[in-house]
Amino acid sequence: MPGTRNTERLVALVFGAALAFNYPLLYLFAEGGVVFGLPLLVVYLFLSWLIFIVLTALLMERWSRRADASLPEDPSAPDD
């Protein structure tokens, strides 16, 4: 199946996000520390959120390209 690996990656990404935003890991960053004048927890949340958005976008773009490549060409499309 062509989409199986991408589906597995998407499921792993969702589980990774669920673990990253779970209480025990968040508690590690809530204990203190400041980065560029911002609390470490805030920096962690925004950076991890950004990373998951970028990874999801890359995965879905790859998935879209594979789906487009597997479609037959449209015979009614004009030739260049």
Image (tube, helix red, strand yellow):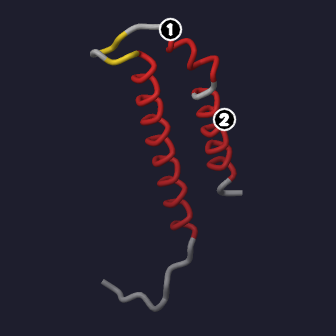
The residue type indicated by label 1 comes to Glu
SS state under label 2: helix
Quadrant assignment for the N terminus: bottom right
* Coordinates of residue 56 in the picture (x, y in percent): 51, 45
Numbered label attached to residue 60: none
Quarter occupied by residue 17: top right
Residue drawn where x is 52% and y is 48% of the image: 59
SS state under label 1: loop
Quarter occupied by residue 27: top right
Using a 10 Å C-alpha cutoff, classify the residue at mark 2 as few (fewer than 14 neighbours), some (14 to 19) or many (20 or more). Answer: few
Residue to which mark 2 is pinned: 15
Q: Is residue 3 left or right of residue 40?
A: right
Quarter occupied by residue 14: top right
Residue drawn where x is 41% and y is 29% of the image: 47
Q: Does residue 74 lie above or below 33 as drawn?
A: below
Numbered label attached to residue 31: 1
Q: Residue furthest left?
A: 36
Q: Does residue 74 lie above or below 36 as drawn?
A: below
